[in-house]
Amino acid sequence: MTTSTGSIPAAAATPSRRELNKAATRQAITDAALSLLRSHGPGSFTVEDIADTAGISRRTFFNYFSSTDAALAAVTHGFLDNAIQQFRLRPADEPILQSAQAALMALADPMTVAPLAELFTLTQQSTLMSHSELQAWEHCTEQIIAVARERVTGAAEGVDELYVRALAGAVISCGKAALEVWFTRRGADLSPASLAELRQLLIDSMALLGSGFTAGTSPASRSTSSASVSS
């Protein structure tokens, strides 16, 4: 397990062959689920379909996921896991929300948000996908709670459970707001430029949360203010 110093243990940096094989199988399952979602649409494929597409048995599928919804929800987890890894590399004494923003900025390639964006887009198009979306956000919340606990465990006053859970809830709400604004602007556009805009909106949402939502702190607000002054 990662310590509060933000360092990554050697074992985590050098996974075993078994761990690599398990990760590859898990990725094959989620890739197959997303592929079937694109081609067949929500609710039009089964666990057996995913297993066949991934080249595994039905039994192997259930070693990793409990349902098609769980496999689809996991599509977004790669992005979150990358962001959390970057968060854990930040200095332990850095404010948590500043670390969160820096972690998102460290994911420089806009394509890193592609799975998150695509699943969100497909979710908006069908009520059948609402369960998958809920599972994805629940996973995000629990991961953020775990990371926040790691950061505050060494504090003299101990872990404030209300603080940790309120922080996780606020981060998730800001993430959802960024996705909703992006979808309103871009719809189903998954081009590099669109994904770059989503990445920036996620970064900006963390900045707003870190500033306490002080008026005029978002890049959009600053741009509007500058335009008003110049005119």
Image (cartoon, grey):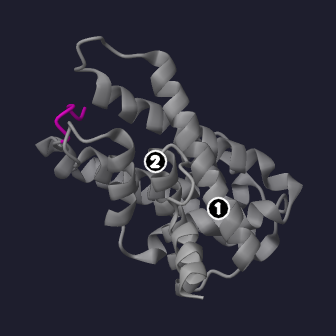
Question: Percent x, y for residue 26?
Answer: 48, 54
- Indicate the amino acid at tag 2: Ser
Q: Is residue 51 left or right of residue 6?
A: right
Magenta span: predominant SS is: loop
Q: Which quarter of the figure has residue 45?
A: bottom right
Give yes or no for contact between labels 1 and 2 (Cβ–Cβ under 8 Å).
no
Residue at which label 1 appears: 179
Which residue is more in the foreground, 139 or 160? 160
Q: Which residue sits at x=31%, y=40%?
A: 95
Q: Give the range drawn in magenta.
A: 1-6
User: How many discs mark residues in the rendered view?
Assistant: 2
Question: Percent x, y for residue 118?
Answer: 65, 69
Q: Residues within 10 Å of mark 1 (few under 14, many from 20)?
A: many
**Extreme left residue here?**
10
Q: In this view, does 42 lie to the left or right of 220?
A: right
Image quarter in which the C terminus is found: bottom right
The dot on residue 211 is: 2
- Residue 63 visible in the picture: no
- Indicate the amino acid at tag 1: Leu
Vertical comparison of 222 with 206: above or below:
below
Q: Is residue 4 magenta?
A: yes
Q: Is residue 205 magenta?
A: no
Question: Percent x, y for residue 63?
Answer: 53, 40
Image quarter in which the N terminus is found: top left
Q: What element carries label 2?
A: loop
Q: Which residue sits at x=69%, y=65%?
A: 181
Which residue is more in the foreground, 186 or 213? 213
